[in-house]
Amino acid sequence: MSWDEWEQLKSRAVERRSTSMQLNQVPLEGGTEPQGDLKVNQKDLALVGDSAFKLFETLGKHGRDAWAPSQTAAKDLTTQGFELGGGLNHVQERWEKQLQSLLDACAHISNHMDFTKKAHAGDEYHIYSTVSSIATLDKGFSERTQR
């Protein structure tokens, strides 16, 4: 590659970069950090946590309903010389692993939402008490200047 080719490739890359779409951030206005629009309240957190917990309970209760019949069928098919028995057993083992992963994920989400709800409640209390203290200070300064 010659030096001229290299320079042409570099200039084309710069041109493409200036016209390409950027998806990884919001353009900054006036040099300030973007604030975002994601908002969540205690009710939202509670609903997510409750849904995850209900899914956990239902899957835990009914996710293995087909286990015993599937194992019986797999054993019978294998005993009778059908290779399908091994395949059915493999599918059942994979189902069990996937079910356990989903149960773990539901438990994690539910527990995390409970933790987040408690952490935000603590933050709310801290902010309230700090603001209340500032209001008390302001009131004291106001009373002092009015004398």
Image (spheres, rainbow, N blue to C red):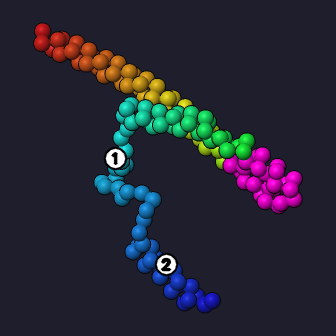
Residue indicated by mark 1? 37
Is label 2 in a helix, a strand or a loop?
helix
Q: In the picture provided, is 2 more to the left or to the right than 120? A: right
Q: Nearer the viewer, mark 2 or mark 1?
A: 1
Task: Pick whichever, 81 or 33, lies toward us.
Answer: 81
- The numbered mark, 2 or 1, whose residue comes first in the sequence reads 2
Against 60, residue 134 (above or below) is above
Please state which of residues 100 and 65 is positioned toward the viewer in this rendering: 65
Label pair 2/1, CB-CB below 8 angstroms? no
What segment is highlighted magenta in the picture? 70-97
The x and y percentages for residue 4 are 55, 90
Determine the residue positioned at 67% across, 44% down. Answer: 66
In the rendering, which numbered label is found on residue 13? Answer: 2
Residue sitting at x 37%, y 32%: 43
The amino acid type found where label 1 is placed reads: Asp
Instruction: Give 143 or 108, whichever is nearer the viewer.
Output: 108
Residue 138 location in percent, x, y? 23, 18
Answer left or right for 102 relative to 115.
right
**Distance from Cα at disc 2 to Cα at disc 1:** 34 Å
User: Which one is in front, 36 or 112?
Assistant: 112
Residue at 72%, 45% in the rendered image: 69
Residue 140 falls inside the magenta stretch = no
Give the image quarter of residue 77.
bottom right
